[in-house]
Each structure stands twice: as structure tokens, then as C-alpha cells.
Image (cartoon, rainbow, N blue to C red):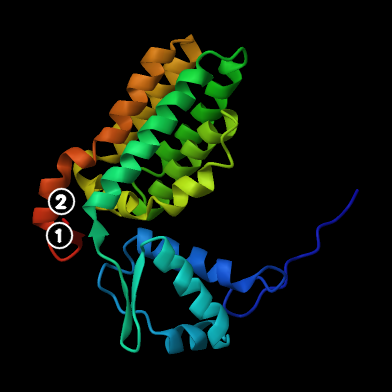
């Protein structure tokens, strides 16, 4: 029996046995997606260096990565700001996700082990339901875990990071719209997807996924009216 060696943690929570810049990316990305760092928020490199006890290089590299994901906008010699939610980019990501995930659940419903897949998804959805009254950021993180299972079971786990890198705008829209959609709808549409897979009904599973993913974009006008400072209509 082997024992795990505890990861070396810095006082800031960084794991010194791993590359530093990706950890800063993960930390800032989650805060941006949760809207703890709202669109328009200034990110000070100096303050981030102090917060993490780091040199300029890993902080700069992390912000460059977030800029590539469209989550921050860097104005050289001026400021780095959390990007507004770009509706055009959100629409594009939605089309990509819908195409991939509808195809994924369609294929899962045709698999011989679809009952086991459905059981695994049901466990994840039960955990999600338990978080329905908690912080929305925590709920949406569990929702992402549910969707990752679909990618994993469909053999698409290498596509997942690509999807995640392009999902910042649609994820923030979902966060803003969750108060309208409600956590119950998310859980219920997950149940519809699971049922379609378990029954071996690929068309039903794919339609349920389409329904699940389509709620936010149908509310764009309402979201933009409620949060005009957060949205870039393009």
C-alpha cells in the first residue's frame, strides 16, 4: 500500500509542485465565472503578485491566458479589465456545445452499458440537486461536473478543455440567468437526458440536451436589460 505525499502548499494556497501560472488562471477564471470579479473589474498585476507572493512572470502569463480565453482585456500601459460578456461569442460557443453534446448523448443512448452511464449521471445529478439552495457558483461547478461525465463516457474528454476555454461568456450568462431559469429546471432537464440514455432512446436524449442548453440564449434581451454594464451586444 502506497501513501500519497501531501502537496506542498504556499500560504496563498498554490501548489508548489505544479506549474504556478495555470493555477492562477484556474483561480481567476472561477472568480470571473462566479461573477465575484464582475465585468469591468480592474485586475492589478502588482496586487496579484503581492497576493500570491510571486514574481511578475507567472502573473503576466496567467493574464495572457485569460485574455486568449476572452475573459480579460489587456490595455497595454493602462489596465487589465475583466471582459464584458460578448453575446456573439456566447452564441458561437452555444452552437458548438449543442452540436457536440447532442451527438454525445445520442451515442451514449446506443451503448450497451448505457444503464451504468445513466447511474453515474444520476449520482452526479443527485449531488447537484443537493446544492440547489446553495451558492450559485457552487451549483454551476457541479453542473459542469455532470457535463464532464458525458464527455468522458462518450470518449470526448480531450475535447472538454477546448469547450471550457471557449465557455466563459456563455457560462457567465448562465450565472446571471440562473435566477430566472431556476436550479430545479437544470436538475429536471438533466433527468430527461438521463432517462433518454437509460431507455436507449437517442433522439429523446438529444432533444433533452437541446432543451437543457437552450434556456439561457432565449433570455438574452432580459439579461441585457437587467445587467447593461455587463453585456457587450456586438
* Residue 36 horizontal/vertical position (percent): 33, 67
Which of the labelled discs sits on residue 31, or is there none?
none
Q: Is residue 217 above or below residue 77?
A: above
Disc 2: CA contacts within 10 A as few (<14), some (14-19) or many (>=20): some
The reply to whether callout 1 and callout 2 are in contact (CB within 8 Å) is: yes
Q: Which of 135 and 56 is in front in this view?
A: 56
- Give the SS element for disc 2: helix
Q: Is residue 129 above or below residue 15?
A: above
* Residue, disc 2: 223
Residue at point 25%, 40% (across, down): 182
Q: Can residue 49 be seen in this view?
A: yes
* Residue 142 horizontal/vertical position (percent): 46, 45
* Residue, disc 1: 227
* Residue 4 horizontal/vertical position (percent): 81, 58
* Residue 76 horizontal/vertical position (percent): 35, 84
Q: Which of 220 and 88 is in front in this view?
A: 88
Residue at point 45%, 33% (across, down): 125
- Give the SS element for disc 1: loop
Task: Specify the farthest residue to the left.
Answer: 225
Left/right of residue 184 with respect to residue 124 in the rendered view: left
Amino acid at each position: 500500500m502506497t501513501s500519497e505525499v501531501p502537496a506542498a502548499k504556499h500560504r496563498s494556497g498554490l501548489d508548489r509542485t505544479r506549474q504556478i501560472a495555470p493555477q492562477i488562471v484556474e483561480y481567476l477564471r472561477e472568480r470571473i465565472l462566479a461573477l465575484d470579479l464582475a465585468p469591468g473589474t480592474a485586475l492589478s498585476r502588482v496586487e496579484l503578485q503581492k497576493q500570491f507572493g510571486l514574481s511578475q512572470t507567472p502573473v503576466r502569463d496567467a493574464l495572457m491566458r485569460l485574455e486568449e480565453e476572452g475573459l480579460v482585456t489587456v490595455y497595454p500601459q493602462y489596465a487589465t479589465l475583466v471582459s464584458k460578456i460578448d453575446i456573439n461569442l456566447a452564441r458561437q460557443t452555444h452552437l458548438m456545445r449543442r452540436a457536440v453534446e447532442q451527438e454525445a448523448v445520442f451515442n451514449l443512448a446506443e451503448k450497451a452499458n448505457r444503464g451504468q452511464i445513466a447511474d453515474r449521471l444520476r449520482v452526479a445529478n443527485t449531488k447537484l440537486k443537493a446544492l440547489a439552495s446553495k451558492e450559485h457558483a457552487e451549483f454551476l461547478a457541479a453542473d459542469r461536473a455532470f457535463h464532464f461525465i458525458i464527455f468522458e463516457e462518450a470518449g470526448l474528454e480531450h475535447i472538454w478543455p477546448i469547450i471550457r476555454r471557449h465557455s466563459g461568456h456563455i457560462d457567465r450568462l448562465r450565472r446571471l440567468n440562473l435566477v430566472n431559469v431556476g436550479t430545479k429546471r437544470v436538475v429536471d432537464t438533466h433527468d430527461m437526458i438521463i432517462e433518454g440514455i437509460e431507455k436507449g432512446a437517442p433522439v429523446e436524449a438529444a432533444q433533452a440536451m437541446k432543451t437543457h442548453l437552450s434556456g439561457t440564449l432565449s433570455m438574452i434581451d432580459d439579461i441585457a436589460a437587467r445587467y447593461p454594464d455587463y453585456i457587450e451586444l456586438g
